[in-house]
Image (spheres, rainbow, N blue to C red):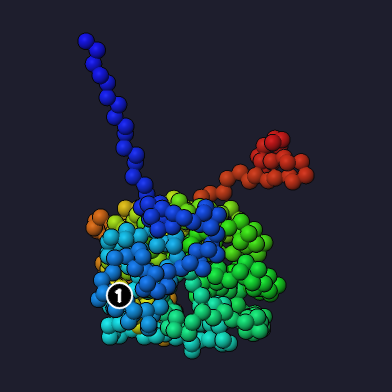
Amino acid sequence: MKQDTITVEADEPPLPLSESNRRKYFGNISGAEWNDWRWHFRNRITSVEDLSRFLPLSVKERTRLKLVSARYPFAITPYYMCQMDLDNPADPIRQQAVPCVQELAPGSGREDPLEEGSHSVVPGLVHRYPDRALMVLTDLCPMLCRHCTRKREWRNGGWVHSPAEVERMLDYIRRTPQIRDVIISGGDPLSLSTRRLEEVLAALREIKHVEIIRIGTRFPVVLPQRIDAELCDMLSKYGPIWLNTHFNHPNEITPESTAACDRLLRSGVQVNNQSVLLRGINDTVDTQLKLCHGLLKAKVRPYYLFQCDQVQGTEHLWTPVEVGLRIIEGMRGHTSGLAIPNYVIDLPDGRGKIPLAPNYVLSRTDQELVVRNYEGHISHFANPAHIAPVRKHKAAPAGPQLKLDLNTTEVKDENRAGVRS
């Protein structure tokens, strides 16, 4: 007796979170618009009403968000919004982008803890270290990160330094030959048009003593569509350029952000990463290992892990320094040194960066160091500076003398006939 057959269709695999969010909230947007960074910039989420389209907000939450954003505005690109788990208030991407009432809590933070204002030699140009200068071209950003070190600028609205102001910065650099390294920052300098940015790069490249140009930008993370062929072709003309970007969590390493970094590398721009240690976002060994391994797979070097600057309105994101030290200690020996960033504090009052590392030296004398390795094993290491000099041996009796005739390449033994080599 013939049995009926039943065909069971396999369930389709679930869509990635970002693609699911994109279809849900931006399904009517064409591919051309979605791939245009200008569309994302124009359509940033900047009001509580906009935000409520994505996040279920109670009346109380809306009121609180309006209070916070009146002092500290927010801006989130559609691309970055789609990377969030919108149902999870503790989502690490959401915490970096969406305001919270804790930003208004009284604390010990300062508006300008690094004293950039006091080191500003002309408006927009900070000259703190002898051989480096920082050009701040704009306060415009695709996203306003809640831990931003220049959070003080947000109340001033979106500004861009005029060509005349930029020329004053360039003139100072021309007149200061010890400056060999210029960092272009903001805001985010890639918020400017490619043409405007090229004008600055071309002018810097005409200054003979400027060897290195660095660009600080978070565009590869929050709006990777900006890293397009036009930008990369332009950057390729003005190397060496080093681009420092800002991945804080492994969830930010997406196919789009990885492709953006790849385009930069193929145009001759080296890409480093500068993370900020943030409470509840990336303050564990496991998260940092995943982040740094993901960065290396994307061909991005983990460069710095910054202790969060003590900026007003960011206190809820600070971690004790011991947390950062434990993270570095937990990574050391369990991954390649290439994957371990330098853990640094940018000191208050503009005193510069200092590196911090776990203490592996248990004791020290002139003769030796007692050290522990990553597994806790103790070793004694003789201090080479205090090793006794090697004793000279008694000279051996002189043997037959060999001479080399440079004209004939003939080696002659005083006691034998010459033998041609």
- According to the picture, the residue beneath numbered tag 1 turns out to be 62
Quarter of the figure with the N terminus = top left
Question: In the drawing, does residue 275 fall left or right of residue 377?
Answer: right
Question: In the drawing, does residue 399 fall left or right of residue 394?
Answer: right
Residue at 67% across / 72% down in the picture? 199
Residue at 65% across / 68% down in the picture? 195
Question: Would you call the spot at circle 1 few (<14 residues within 10 Å), some (14-19), or many (20 or more)?
Answer: some
Nearer to us in this view, 387 or 328: 328
Nearer to us in this view, 178 or 184: 184
From the top left corner, tell me how far across and down residue 200 is, in percent: 64, 73
Q: Is residue 359 visible?
A: no
- The picture quadrant where one finds residue 179 is bottom right
Nearer to us in this view, 218 or 192: 192
From the top left corner, tell me how far across and down residue 52 is, in percent: 34, 68
Three-letter amino acid code at the position of disc 1: Arg
Question: In the drawing, does residue 190 fall left or right of residue 2?
Answer: right
The extreme top residue here reads 1
Nearer to us in this view, 97 or 264: 97
From the top left corner, tell me how far across and down residue 247 is, in percent: 42, 62
Per the image, label 1 sits on a secondary structure element best described as helix
- The picture quadrant where one finds residue 230 is bottom right
Q: Is residue 66 visible?
A: yes
Residue at 48% across / 87% down in the picture? 117
* Residue 19 in the image: above or below residue 92: above
Quarter of the figure with the C terminus = top right
* Residue 244 in the image: above or below residue 17: below
- The picture quadrant where one finds residue 62 is bottom left
Residue at 39% across / 85% down in the picture? 111
